[in-house]
Image: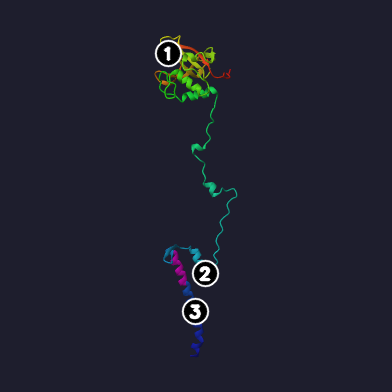
């Protein structure tokens, strides 16, 4: 009885130690079960499961220290700046300034906006034109007031001696069908070919409305009478 009494304290110590180990094993199994499950049940609601590292630190008693985020480089763009992309909207880009080029270039560019407009005798635009109504309408846009009739327009402005003196924007005149010596048609020079001694002009024709034609076409070559200059003289390149 005495020997048994002396061994009892050792038995109690061993038993307490085993209980402690059992409790630790139980806690560890519970942690592993929570990690494998993936969620915690809190108050009847499903909440995301904390990481296994966080749970283990709580059980073992290690202080959980959050990891600091690495500092961004000083020259790194902000999130707001990085999210902004250059605009591809055409309306956001710079437009070409109005009035680009010489005055004659502007007159020609404006005249070309009416290409395809139908012909009608006596019409002065902008939906219908005859030849002199077209030239009058175009030049009026730039502050030059011409008369309606082509024969009268041949008396306006300054005389152009010949093909070699033509420049863009000059008025060119042609004879009538029945009488090539009497003016019956007018157009605006758009380009001059000095090597060929010819020019291209825009006009309101009876057959095609507002079109561009070459002076080398037989019909116009036979009926060409002369030209007049309404616009200021341009500097010619030698």
Residue where numbered disc 1 is placed? 219
Q: Earlier in the sequence, mark 3 or mark 2?
A: 3
Residue where numbered disc 2 is placed? 60
CA distance separating discs 3 and 2: 19 Å
* Residue depth check, mark 2 versus mark 1: number of the one nearer the observer: 1
Indicate the position of residue 31 as horizontal and vertical percent values.
46, 67
Residue where numbered disc 3 is placed? 16
Mark 2 closeness class: few <14, some 14–19, many ≥20 residues within 10 Å = few
* Residue depth check, mark 3 versus mark 2: number of the one nearer the observer: 2
Indicate the position of residue 73 as horizontal and vertical percent values.
59, 50
Q: Quadrant of residue 212?
A: top left
Question: Which residue is farthest left?
Answer: 207
Mark 1 closeness class: few <14, some 14–19, many ≥20 residues within 10 Å = few
- The magenta region covers 25-35
Left or right of 209? Residue 76 is right
Where's the C terminus, which quadrant? top right
């Amino acid at each position: 009885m005495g020997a048994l009494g002396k061994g009892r304290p050792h038995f109690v110590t061993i038993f307490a130690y085993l209980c402690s180990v059992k409790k630790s094993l139980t806690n560890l199994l519970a942690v592993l079960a929570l990690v494998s499950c993936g969620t915690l049940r809190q108050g009847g609601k499903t909440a995301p499961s904390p990481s296994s590292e966080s749970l283990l630190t709580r059980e073992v008693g290690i202080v959980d220290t959050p990891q600091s985020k690495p500092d961004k480089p000083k020259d790194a763009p902000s999130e707001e700046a990085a999210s902004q992309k250059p605009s591809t909207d055409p309306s956001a880009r710079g437009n070409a300034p109005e009035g680009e080029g010489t005055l004659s270039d502007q007159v020609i560019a404006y005249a070309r906006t009416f290409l395809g407009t139908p012909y009608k005798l006596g019409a002065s635009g902008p939906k219908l034109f005859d030849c002199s109504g077209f030239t009058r309408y175009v030049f009026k846009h730039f502050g030059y007031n011409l008369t309606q009739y082509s024969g009268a327009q041949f008396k306006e402005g300054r005389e152009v001696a010949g093909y070699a003196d033509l420049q863009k924007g000059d008025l060119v005149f042609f004879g009538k069908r029945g009488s090539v010596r009497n003016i019956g048609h007018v157009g605006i020079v758009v380009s001059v070919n000095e090597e060929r001694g010819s020019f291209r002009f825009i006009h309101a024709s009876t057959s095609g409305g507002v079109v561009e034609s070459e002076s080398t076409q037989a019909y116009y070559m036979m009926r060409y009478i002369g030209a007049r200059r309404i616009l200021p003289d341009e500097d010619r390149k030698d």
